[in-house]
Image (spheres, rainbow, N blue to C red):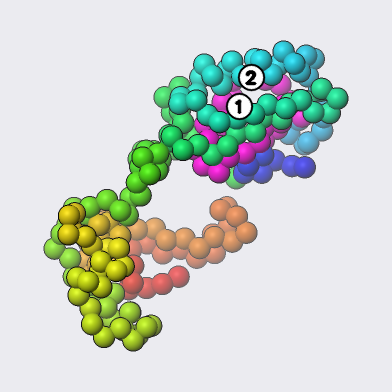
């Protein structure tokens, strides 16, 4: 076993693991193994049963809101496995900051990512929010649909079918991203390889439809 984006080893119990609890809760969940060094060697804990209580108290006192986790003694009670589930009440904060995993490292999220976590916690997606610009045109999108699925008629009903428009809020941000012109300063589209550390292709769109090009 080795450290990955969802697995971390902690030879001893220090407060640094709480950042990773935040990261796992905010995203895909994960496991932290205590009493194991970075190379995956079992070092053991002096009193694993007491260590479980210490870990529990640290999480309960330091992470808000309360994450969903379990603790399990392993290797003849020499090590501890802490399993953290992806939470529904994002963002999960440690010392008022939210964290994420970047390969095997745990880092603080930036302001934009924090906003996305807040929306995710409310079960709202950025693309579902009303677009600030409601004067949108879709000539490029129409042309792409005409080429790919032989679409002939393109109107508000088409946009409603594509979940880009509704009568209450008008166009949403997804519509803005696909519109001929938009107010978004930079849309970064990335194609990853075997993991998020491997970028195969990348394109940035400034104030134009992402349909102008494709990865």
Which residue position holds label 1?
A: 17
| Residue 121, image x, y percentages | 40, 39
Give the Cα separation between the discs numbered 2 and 1: 9 Å
Query: What residue appears at the point 80 percent right and 15 percent down from the top-left corner?
Result: 46
Please tell me whether mark 2 or mark 1 is closer to you in this view.
2
Chain part drawn in magenta: 8-36
The local secondary structure at tag 1 comes to helix
Q: Position of residue 73 (x, y in %)?
A: 76, 25
Q: Determine which of the numbered discs, if any, sits on residue 107 in the image.
A: none
> Percent from the top left, x then y, of residue 207?
25, 62
Q: Are marks 2 and 1 in contact (CB under 8 Å)?
A: yes
Residue that numbered label 2 is attached to: 55
Q: In the displayed structure, does residue 66 sit left or right of residue 147?
A: right
Q: Position of residue 194 (x, y in %)?
A: 62, 59
In the image: residue 157, left or right of residue 40: left
Extreme residue toward the left, this view: 135
């Amino acid at each position: 076993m080795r450290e990955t984006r969802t697995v971390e080893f902690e030879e001893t119990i220090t407060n640094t693991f709480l950042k990773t609890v935040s990261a796992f809760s905010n995203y895909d969940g994960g496991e932290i193994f205590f009493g194991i060094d970075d190379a995956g060697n079992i070092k053991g804990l002096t009193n694993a049963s007491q260590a479980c209580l210490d870990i529990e108290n640290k999480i309960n006192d330091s992470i808000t809101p309360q994450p969903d986790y379990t603790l399990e003694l392993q290797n003849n009670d020499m090590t501890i496995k802490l399993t953290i589930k992806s939470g529904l009440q994002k963002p999960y904060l440690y010392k008022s900051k939210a964290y994420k995993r970047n390969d095997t490292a745990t880092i603080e999220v930036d302001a934009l990512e924090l906003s996305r976590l807040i929306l995710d916690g409310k079960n709202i997606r950025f693309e579902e929010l009303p677009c600030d610009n409601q004067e949108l045109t879709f000539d490029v999108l129409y042309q792409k649909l005409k080429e790919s699925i032989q679409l002939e008629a393109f109107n508000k009903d088409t946009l409603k079918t594509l979940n880009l428009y509704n009568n209450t809020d008008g166009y949403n941000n997804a519509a803005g991203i696909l519109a001929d012109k938009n107010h978004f300063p930079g849309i970064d589209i990335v194609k990853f390889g075997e993991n998020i550390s491997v970028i195969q292709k990348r394109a940035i769109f400034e104030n134009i439809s992402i349909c102008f090009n494709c990865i």
